[in-house]
Amino acid sequence: MDVAPSAVELSPGRTGGIVFELALRVPEHLVEPLSDALIDEASALSVSVEDADAGERDEQPMFGEPGLPAPRAAWRRSTLTALFADEAAATEAATLLQAQQWAADVHLVSMAEVADADWVRLTQAQFTPVEVTPTLWVVPSWHEAPPQARVVIRLDPGLAFGTGTHPTTRMCLRWIAANATRHSDTWDRVLDYGCGSGILAVAAGLHGARGIDAVDIDPAAVAATAANASANGVVLSAGLPDGALGRYALVLANILATPLKLLAPLLTGHVAPGGHLVLAGILERQSDELRDAYAPDLSLTVVDREDGWVLMAARRG
């Protein structure tokens, strides 16, 4: 089990009643093995991880950049909270843990009785429909779509980046929605490079695109893209970057400025005559660097801005 910051491993079907919470102070390198041990060997119902210094001067913000995982699996000092079905199970887990030589740096913070809850329902309640435009919405599978939504992308939060909440994703989706009326009849081949969850490829498909290739270096992203496309009734080919072949009427890449600069010859080479290139994951202060990197072949301009991020696009003549 990979334990990401604030991740929760849940045991299904637990609602109502009383559970016991075991809170531990854990160094970064032990978060993942200890979480595994509590779930697999101590029968913990769930494990969550938080910054032990949250709210203090030593708090460590940990946000992954768009298209990339969080920089580390946990904080330098993490609070690991495990829930158990009863006090005996929690006590046994704490006792066994304190006897392990490898756990000498793990410290017991507290053990207390807490009211159980429907954790799956509570987790789902955190994720609500996201408005991209008045008529384009990203909606989790457990929610009804708003009545004003004409195009609905069904997408559940998951491991791969791209749920419509980040400014870079929203700007790409807005561009697709705004340009589909004029150009979707020409989108006979579309490339989503660094597809993550596949949300951009799915959006293009829902707006009339055909011949969609979605590629990513992460096999988990490829699998997520295929699943999300199927859930939305979009036909596409998901695979690794070597699956991007030939030229496309629309090339989308929501990654980061540095890889986008390195990929300039490759991405511009995929843009067909008359085709569009749309790039995101770029901070406003980085726009000149991107413009210079692509200048030998295409003329990038900033076409959208949000929260310090920009969307840049170009069209091949």
Image (cartoon, rainbow, N blue to C red):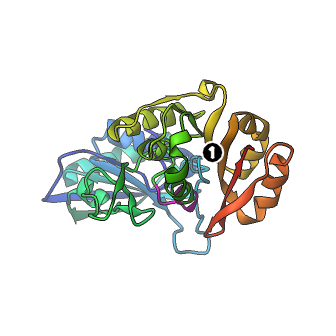
Q: Quadrant of residue 205?
A: top left
Indicate the secondary structure of the residue bearing disc 1. strand
* Magenta segment: 164-170
Residue 178, x across and y down, in percent: 52, 58
Q: In this view, does 248 lie to the left or right of 79?
A: right
Q: Is residue 302 left or right of residue 51?
A: right
Characterize the local packing of mark 1: few (<14), some (14-19) or many (20 or more) Cα atoms within 10 angstroms: many
Which residue sits at x=50%, y=41%? 201
Residue nearest the viewer, comparing 106 with 210: 210
Residue 13, x across and y down, in percent: 17, 47
Q: Quadrant of residue 187?
A: top right
Q: What residue type is labelled 1?
A: Ala
Residue 304, x across and y down, in percent: 63, 64
Residue at mark 1: 253
Asked if the stretch drawn in magenta spans residue 146, the answer is: no
Which residue sits at x=45%, y=42%? 208
Q: Is residue 82 left or right of residue 165?
A: left
